[in-house]
Image: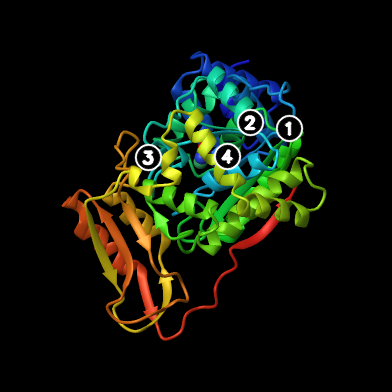
């Protein structure tokens, strides 16, 4: 077999065989297939696509270039959630402790964020002392103790994807549905989970802006999950305005703690409950989704979810006092309000621009090597549909470095539309797709 023949066949629009995909991907991971051939194949896939079968084989091949965790020794079901990401999307820090408190093991391996605000790891790292870089052995120990572990991508998990994703980033081949689906699923399927809940965002602040594109990506990932014998469900959820009331790492941790205390914003609380409920339902902890929702709500109102979060923070070296005293988290030096230009209702909170503004303040990364400031970000006092009076703060920017403040504030002003009438609120969960 030759890599160039495989590239040729894909370029001509043919479907590849399983052995060809395995040969190419294992060779790429081992350094026998060079970057330029992998880039050529990625571009051929970008234009020619892949069948559902090829996409499953690609996922399996990438997964098998690394360690596939086996938690068969754990005495319960294992599940995780993946989100395609958006502004203020912090549900992981809420649903993971809730699901664990309800009896599901959650071995969560997350990424860092690029653009927008930080990823789950960046949020966790704003907690003083919290270690996301546990070895796989430490991860197992934490998981066994508390049913929950939260770590970063390790070099042992799907190394072919790590290499290929970096290559796609610089060869304009990221936006290919089979490549995205296989990339996400190769990492999640390596976690040794029985079930996966996908939160596929749609709208202005999402990776996929159009509902149909988000649905097609969700379907591709569902087909992979099914092809690999896992239980998977996908929720397509709104990202036309930020989720919850904050964007920025430490600010989001405070909001998650508040939500686990039953004092969170309704949109964030209800989506976190729904995603956690599906983790219970798919793993057979409950037989009906209504029962799963009830159980998760109980874990929230009893404080069991909060205690679980506190426990995992402590086990991973973090300061659990963040759950009692937000003052233990980093705080920005300055607050700058963005006022309503006139009376009316908030008709738009342009999510993409607000994510960009948060990034300019230092809450997200412009480049892979950029450093995040955990303290900064944006607090949203109003959501779409809320009444405002002229001059009232709609948002507050939490600022340390003023160098890009003017630009960030301009973006926020441009993202805000106040009108006599607001559009009727979009449903937060737009569709639930089962495999
Ligand atoms: N996230 C991933 O992990 N991979 C992609 O290809 C796109 C988003």
SS for tag 4? helix
Residue at image location 74% in from the left, 27% down from the top: 75
Residue at image location 59% in from the left, 49% down from the top: 303
Characterize the local packing of mark 1: few (<14), some (14-19) or many (20 or more) Cα atoms within 10 angstroms: some
**Circle nearer the N terminus (4, 3):** 3
185 sits left or right of 373 in the view = right
Cα distance between the residues tagged 3 and 1: 35 Å
Tag in front: 4 or 3 = 4
> Residue 58: horizontal and vertical position, in percent?
63, 30
Q: Nearer the viewer, residue 1 or 291?
A: 291
Q: Identify residue for label 4.
A: 308
Q: How is the image coloured?
A: rainbow
Q: Nearer the viewer, residue 43 or 182?
A: 182
**Circle nearer the N terminus (1, 4):** 1
SS for tag 3? loop
433 sits left or right of 352 in the view = right
Q: Which mark is residue 228?
A: 1
**Circle nearer the N terminus (1, 2):** 2
Q: Is residue 29 above or below residue 327?
A: above
Cα distance between the residues tagged 4 and 2: 33 Å
Cα distance between the residues tagged 1 and 2: 9 Å
Q: Residue furthest left?
A: 403
Q: Identify residue for label 2.
A: 59
Q: Is residue 105 above or below residue 206?
A: above
- Identify the image quadrant of residue 246: bottom left
Tag in front: 1 or 2 = 1
Q: Identify residue for label 3.
A: 126
SS for tag 2? helix
**Circle nearer the N terminus (2, 3):** 2
Q: Nearer the viewer, residue 400 or 20?
A: 400
């Amino acid at each position: 077999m030759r890599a160039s023949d495989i590239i040729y066949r894909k370029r001509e629009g043919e479907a590849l065989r399983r052995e060809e995909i395995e040969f190419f991907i294992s060779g790429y991971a081992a350094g026998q297939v060079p970057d330029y051939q992998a880039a050529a194949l990625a571009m051929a896939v970008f234009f020619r696509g892949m069948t559902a079968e090829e996409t499953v084989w690609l996922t399996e091949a990438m997964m098998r270039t690394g360690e596939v965790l086996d938690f068969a020794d754990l005495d319960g079901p294992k599940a995780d959630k993946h989100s395609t990401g958006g502004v203020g999307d912090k549900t992981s820090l809420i649903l993971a402790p809730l699901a664990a408190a309800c009896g599901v093991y959650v071995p969560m391996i997350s990424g860092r964020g690029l653009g927008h605000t930080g990823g789950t790891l960046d949020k966790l790292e704003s907690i003083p002392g919290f270690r996301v870089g546990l070895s796989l052995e430490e991860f197992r120990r934490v998981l066994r103790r508390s049913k929950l572990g939260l770590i970063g991508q390790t070099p042992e998990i799907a190394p072919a994807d790590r290499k290929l994703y970096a290559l796609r980033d610089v060869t304009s081949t990221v936006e290919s549905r089979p490549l995205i689906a296989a990339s996400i699923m190769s990492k999640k399927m390596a976690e040794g989970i029985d079930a996966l809940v996908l939160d596929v965002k749609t709208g202005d602040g999402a990776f996929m802006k159009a509902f149909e594109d988000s649905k097609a990506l969700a379907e591709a990932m569902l087909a992979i999950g099914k092809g690999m014998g896992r239980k998977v469900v996908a929720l397509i959820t709104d990202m036309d305005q930020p989720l919850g009331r904050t964007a920025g790492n430490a600010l989001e941790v405070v909001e998650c703690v508040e939500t686990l205390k039953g004092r969170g914003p309704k949109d964030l609380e209800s989506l976190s409950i729904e995603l956690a409920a599906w983790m219970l339902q798919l793993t057979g902890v409950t037989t009906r989704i209504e029962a799963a929702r009830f159980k998760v709500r109980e874990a929230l109102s009893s404080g069991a979810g909060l205690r679980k979060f506190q426990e995992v923070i402590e086990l991973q070296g973090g300061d659990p006092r963040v759950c009692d005293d937000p003052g233990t988290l980093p705080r920005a030096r300055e607050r700058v309000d963005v006022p309503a230009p006139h009376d009316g209702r908030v008709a738009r909170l342009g999510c993409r621009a607000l994510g960009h503004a948060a990034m300019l303040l230092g809450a997200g990364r412009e480049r892979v090597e950029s450093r995040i400031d955990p303290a900064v970000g944006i607090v949203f006092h109003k959501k779409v549909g809320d009444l405002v009076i002229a001059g009232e703060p709609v948002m507050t920017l939490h600022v340390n470095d003023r160098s890009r403040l003017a630009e960030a504030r301009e973006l926020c002003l441009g993202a805000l539309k106040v009108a006599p009438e607001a559009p009727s609120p979009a449903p937060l969960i737009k569709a639930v797709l089962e495999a």
